[in-house]
Image (cartoon, grey):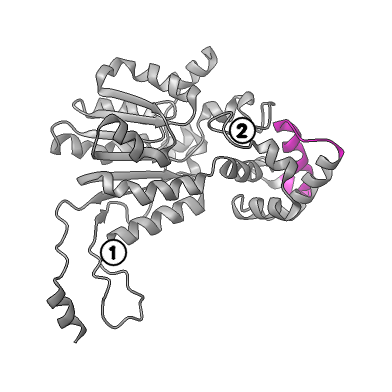
Amino acid sequence: MPEAAAIAARHIPVLRDRVVDLARPLGARVEAPRFLDATLGLGGHSQALLEACPTAELLGLDRDREALALASARLAPFGARVHTMHSRFSASCKALDELGWQSVDFALIDIGVSSMQLDEGQRGFSLHANGPLDMRMDQGEGPSAADLVNTLPFEKLREIIATLGEDPMAQRIARAICEARARAPIRETLALADIVSQAYPRAWRAKSRHHPATRTFQALRMVVNNELGELETFLDSILARLSPGGRLCVITFHSLEDRLVKRSMRRWASGCLCPPHAPVCRCHHQPEVELLTKKPLVADREELARNPRASSAKLRACEKLAVPQALPTTEERDQESV
């Protein structure tokens, strides 16, 4: 725990300054803004937000109990301005209800893995420090990565590694895993990392900038923690809890996650959801948000020099329209259809 606390103290969250810049106007616009950090992690984003907006109150959620404890200690100097809860970010609305908040002025999720989780072997995420093959954000909840690796059929393993890991060697890797587990169960991180590495052709291993098992570990982690499902649930519910003029920021590290966020925000910002071939708009959908990022924000050279893990981070943001446009009346709709 002392080592973890040291990591938390020096941890600088990805795209921190971009997040603060997006939240700062709310501090001037709203007397006492309410912020939601639904993936609190080690508390870096929340600390920066609270420092930038001295009148803000913040609710921080995390499903990782160890990270939650460290973040709570880090944010303790802010006193009653901070509330923390053990929760998945998909259950943000339930957490808001428990606190008695009807809405928030700024919501943030950062769907990445913290440095502490990646570097500590006992959490089961690390490619370089040995430990039990776990990968659960909330340890003890649901099947672990070891359960998946040792029980899933070949075709399912191949599909996970190919789709979520986007690894061109998915078939070779899945076959190598199945052959290895037939000899003995795969229980530790470095054992799996070695199996995956050996499945790669030697020439590919030599030229790769990353460990050959990086994509396989990412794919397994995403399945173990249902990361795409969590994100979809969050996006389906959070817009209704944003105040008029409130802002949402989402940081992703995977193309499928970014695509899901992009499509959701573009749909919210659209004035019509009818099929392109429809001659007349019949959905009468009104734009619910303004896009603040036409293209995702990414880390600059200075940040990448400090934190190479930020290279795949993408931030998208939108602002809920303060005055929704009125829906057309029945008579107006009938006239349109004539």
Report the disc number at residue 125: 2
Labels 2 and 1: the sequence-earlier one = 2
Q: Residue at x 20, y 25 (%)?
A: 54
Residue at the far top in the pictured view? 2
- Identify the amino acid type marked 2: Phe
Q: Residue at x 61, y 33 (%)?
A: 125
- Image coords of residue 247 (percent x, y): 26, 44
In the image, residue 235 above or below residue 110: below
Report the disc number at residue 147: none
From the viewer's perspective, is 196 left or right of 209? right
Locate residue 274: give its quadrant.
bottom left
For the residues labelled 2 and 1, the Cα–Cα distance comes to: 39 Å
- Identify the amino acid type marked 1: Ser
From the viewer's perspective, is 172 left or right of 131? right
Q: Residues within 10 Å of mark 1 (few under 14, many from 20)?
A: some
> What secondary structure do most residues of the magenta stretch adopt?
helix
In the image, residue 5 above or below residue 289: above
Locate residue 330: give its quadrant.
bottom left
Q: Quadrant of the C terminus?
A: bottom left
Which span of residues is magenta-colored?
Answer: 183-206
Which residue lies under the disc numbered 1?
270
Q: Residues within 10 Å of mark 2 (few under 14, many from 20)?
A: many
Q: Note whether residue 312 is visible.
A: yes
In the image, residue 276 above or below residue 285: below
